[in-house]
Image (cartoon, rainbow, N blue to C red):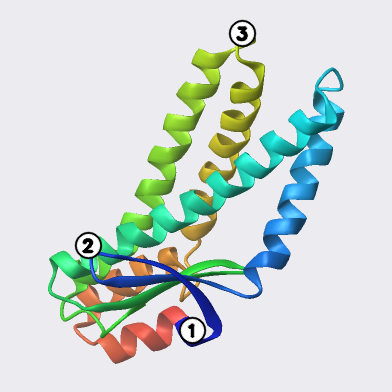
């Protein structure tokens, strides 16, 4: 997918890019957040609504990148090459060079993303709490990011292959059956 993308950077040898469709969802999320912040905080100026909306959108996609990097870093630690990470309209995808060789490796790679999303949710939640009313803009930004990262962690644990939860399920099936092919068929069904 990196061929249909704008290359942003390279992290630990992994090309990171954004697919052209990302700009559509970025604009939609930014305008949605701007409208939400305008509704929730009418005392802010229009510029503040847009600044917080844009910053929140960028940090949201940064959170998705962290989620994908966690998969990638675990894969690299297990000796599995990672070709690229691409952010696109539906989130992000890490293109891992080959299938894991053991169920535990599959489990570790799959679970890394939801763990990072959950940790980001906790971190942003603490930030929102500490910012409180004194730093209202930071609190609003962090509160939304805490919620969305929690939803991202939970959604990715749905046991539908190829979501992370489906890969965790496949790892468990693989461990029980001893067959990656059989585990993949069952998890995909």
Mark 1 and mark 2: span between their CA atoms? 21 Å
> Dot 3: within a 10 Å radius of its alpha carbon, few (fewer than 14), some, or many (20 or more) residues?
few
- The answer to whether residue 21 shows anywhere in this view is yes
The mark that comes first in sequence, 1 or 3, is 1
Residue pictured at 84% horizontal, 17% vertical: 43
> Mark 1 highlights which residue?
1
Give the farthest residue toward the bottom: 181
Q: Which residue is mark 3?
A: 134
Q: Secondary structure at mark 2?
A: helix
Q: Residue at x 63, y 67 (%)?
A: 22
Do the numbered discs 2 and 3 sit on residues whose CB atoms are within 8 Å?
A: no
Say which residue label 2 marks. 74
Is residue 94 something that shows in the picture? Answer: no
Rounded to the nearest angstrom, the CA distance separating label 1 from label 3 is: 43 Å
Instruction: Tell me the SS state at disc 1.
Output: loop
- Can you give x and y, in whole percent of width and height, for residue 181 in the image? 30, 91
Between discs 1 and 2, the one toward the N terminus: 1
Of residue 168 and residue 92, the one placed in the foreground of this image is: 92
Point out the tag, 2 or 3, that comes first from the N-terminus: 2
Q: Is residue 145 above or below residue 178?
A: above
Few, some or many residues within 10 Å of mark 2 (<14, 14–19, 20+) = some
Tell me the quarter of the picture where residue 83 sits: bottom left
Residue 132, image x and y in percent? 59, 12
Dividing the picture into quadrants, the one containing residue 123 is top left
**How far apart are the two marked residues, 2 and 3, measured between alpha carbons?**
39 Å
Residue lying farthest top? 134
User: Residue 173 vs residue 80: left or right?
Assistant: right
């Amino acid at each position: 997918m990196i061929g249909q993308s704008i290359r942003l950077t390279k992290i630990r040898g992994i090309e990171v890019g954004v697919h052209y469709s990302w700009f559509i969802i970025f604009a939609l999320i930014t305008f949605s957040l701007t409208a939400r912040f305008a509704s929730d905080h009418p005392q802010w100026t229009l510029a503040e609504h847009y600044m917080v909306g844009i910053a929140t959108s960028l940090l949201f996609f940064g959170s998705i990148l962290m989620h994908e990097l966690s998969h990638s870093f675990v894969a690299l630690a297990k000796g599995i090459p990672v070709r690229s990470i691409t952010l696109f309209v539906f989130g992000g995808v890490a293109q891992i060079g080959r299938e894991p060789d053991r169920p535990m490796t599959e489990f570790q790679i799959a679970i890394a993303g939801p763990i990072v999303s959950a940790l980001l949710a906790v971190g942003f939640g603490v930030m929102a709490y500490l910012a409180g009313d004194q730093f209202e803009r930071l609190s609003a930004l962090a509160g939304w990011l805490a919620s969305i990262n929690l939803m991202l962690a939970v959604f990715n644990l749905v046991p539908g292959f190829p979501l992370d939860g489906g890969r965790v399920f496949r790892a468990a099936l693989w461990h029980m059956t001893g067959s990656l092919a059989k585990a993949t068929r069952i998890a995909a069904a």
